[in-house]
Amino acid sequence: MRVLLVNMPWAPIDLPSLALGILKRSVDERVPNGTADVLHANLEYVDWITKNTEFTLEDYSYYSLGSYFLGCGDWVFSSALYDDPEWRVPEFTEAMAGRVRGTRMDMTRALHASAPDFVRYIAERIVALAPDLVGFTSTFQQNTAALAAAKYVKRLAPHIATAMGGANCDGKQGEAVHRNFPFVDYVLRGEGEVSFPALLNALDAGEPLSEVPGLCRRGDDGASLVNAMSTRPLPPAAILPPDYGGYFERLASSHARNWVEPKLVVEGARGCWWGEKHHCTFCGLNGSFMEFRSKSPDVFYDEVIELARRHRVLDMYVVDNILDMGYVNTVLPRIIDSGFDLRMHIEIKSNMRQKQLQTLADAGLIFVQPGIESLNSRVLTLMDKGVTGGQNVRMLRDAATVGLSVAWNYLHGFPGEDAADYDDVVAQLPALEHLNPPVGQSSRIAIERFSPYFNNPGLGFRDLRPAEPYRLTYDLPEDEMFDLAYVFDVPPRGIGEEVVRRLDEGIAHWKRNYAGSRLTHCDLEDRIVLVSRRRAFDWTHLELTVPFELALFRLLDQPHTVKAAARKLREGHGVDEDALREVLKRWRALGVVFEDSGQFVQIAPPALNEEFLRIDFMRHASARDTELAATTT
C-alpha cells in the first residue's frame, strides 16, 4: 500500500512535521505491505506564491501563527474549500476592518482569491504520485487547506482514500470534520502511532475497521460511524522517533531556503505532570490525554544525538508541553558532555531554581517558555498556576543570569480579577525593563476546548460560541461549528479596557527600552555594588554596606514576606519588621526589589557576563566615535 502524507500550509517552513515524521516511520515499520512518503506542500506553497507575488517570510509567519486568533490563515483557503474565490469576502472585510488593515487586508484577500489555483495544483501533484491513501495532518491554521486538498483529490481521483488527523481532529472536532465533509473517508482521533498502521493493515487485508481506536469511518450509506477512542495514552516506549527523510532536501531546493535556517523537532514527553494535579484553567493544549509520560533518558538522548548527527542540524525545537524534571540530572548532563553545540527551545515551569536553569543553558536549551502569564499572585491563583508573581520575576532574573532567552505572554480576562491586581504591577514595570519583556502586548484569554474553563461553566464562562473566525470561514450550522471549533467567544470577564490600556502602555515602554536597560549587582562580601541604567531611575551606582542590608539583599534572592525575612534576620542582626519595611520601601522606590502580595524579591542579576558587557561597551563606544566624526567633518 502506497501512502502519501501531506503537510499543507500554514505549517511552519523551518520545521519538519513531527506528526508526519512519526507516521512515516510507523507505516514503514508496522505496515508489512506499506510505504510512506511526505509531500511538503507548505514549501510547495512558498515556491508557488513567490513566483507571481511579493511574499516574504514575515507574510508566511503571519498566516501561520501571527493571525491564529483572527483565523486569517484558515480563511485564505476557505475559498478553495467552497469553490468560490469570493467566498465571504464582504463579511470578512467588515468583521476584520479594525484588526487587519491596509496592505495586510489586501494581501489576505489576494491570497484568498488565488487559493483554489494552488489547491488544484497540489491535488494534481498528489494524484500524479498515485498513492492508495493520502493523509493530511491538521494543526493550527491548516484545517481549511487540508480539507480543500482532500476535496480536490477526491474530485480528481475518487479511488484514492483520504484521511485526516492531528490536533484539529481530536475528540469531538474529528467527529465534526468527518460528519460534515464527506470527501474525507477517514479521520483519526488521538495518537496515531497505533491507529494509523491499524487502519492501513485492515484496509490492505480487507478486514473490518470497527476495532481501529478513535477512527471515524463511513457506513455503506455514507453516514459517519465513530469508533471509541482509546482510554489509555500511548506508553512512552511505543512513541517512535520521527523519520525526516526528504524535508531537508526539499527545503534546500525551495525559495524558503533564503528565509530560514532549518530546525529539528524532537519529543521527549507527552502530557503535563503539573496539569495532572492542577490543570491550568485556560489551557487546552494536551487535548484528550493529560497523563504525563516520558521516554527513558537513554532513548531520548540517543534520539536527539542521532537526529543531529544524521541531519547535521544543531537547532532543535523540543515540543514537550513541560520538561521532565528527571532529564535535568540524566539527559542534559550527557548533552553537555556530548560535544554537540545544540541550541534548543523548551517549555519549563517557572519555579525552577538557578542551578537547574544553568544546566539548561549549558546543555543548549537557551530558549525557554516557562509558562509565565502574569506577575500577580492573586491572578496566578485564579489560573491555578502553582507559582507566585515573585517566583515569576525571579525566573526572569535568573534566566538573565545564566543567559536564557525567555518567551512569555501577559494574559488577562480571568473571572474574579480586578484593577488592583494590575495597578501595582504596572507601577513597577519600569523597574523590570532590564529583564526579558513579554513577546507581545497583553492578551485577553481565549477559551480553548479541553480547558477547565471550557469543561466547567461554573468557573465563570457560559454561553460559549465558536470564535468569530469560524463563522467567517465555514458554512456549517452553529452546533456543528461548535464541535469543530477549538477557540470560543464569550462575553469578556475580568478587567476593563482602561486597565488593559495602562498595562499595554507599560509593556510597550518595557519592550522599547529593554535593549538599553541594565541593572546588575556585584557581591564583594563587605559590600554589594549595584549598577543601573533604566529610564525611570536617575541613579546609576548604589552601594549596600550596612550588614543587615547585605543579609537582606542576599535573602531576597528568593521571594520573602517581611515577617519571614525578619524572622530569619532577627538572630544575627536584631532588626524588627518596621526597620525592614523602611528599607524595602526605599529599595522599591529605587527599583531594586519587586513587590507582590506582600512578598519581595531582588531583581538585579549578578554582573557575571563580561563578554556581554564588553559588547555593550563597544556599541556605545562606536556610537560616540560616530558622533565625534560627525562633529569634525
Image: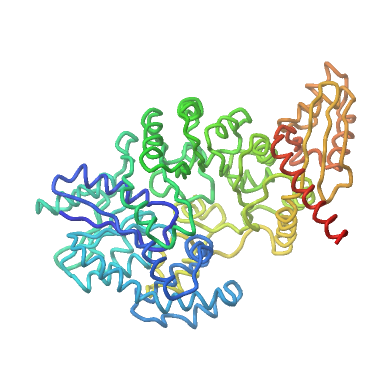
Residue 74 on image: x %, y %: 43, 68
Residue 216 on image: x %, y %: 25, 57
Apparent side of residue 146 relative to residue 95 in the rendered image (left or right): left
The residue shown at (65%, 51%) is 438
State whether residue 512 is above or below residue 391: below
State whether residue 620 is above or below residue 551: below
State whether residue 593 is above or below residue 550: below
> Which of the two residues, 70 or 278, is positioned nearer the viewer here?
70
> Which of the two residues, 265 or 206, is positioned nearer the viewer here?
265
**Residue farthest to the front?**
633
> Which of the two residues, 68 or 290, is positioned nearer the viewer here?
68
Quadrant of the rendered image containing residue 270: top left
Q: Is residue 483 visible?
A: no
> Which of the two residues, 183 or 354, is positioned nearer the viewer here?
354
The residue shown at (74%, 41%) is 596
Residue 225 on image: x %, y %: 22, 60
User: Which quarter of the figure is the N terminus placed in?
Assistant: bottom left
Quadrant of the rendered image containing residue 181: bottom left
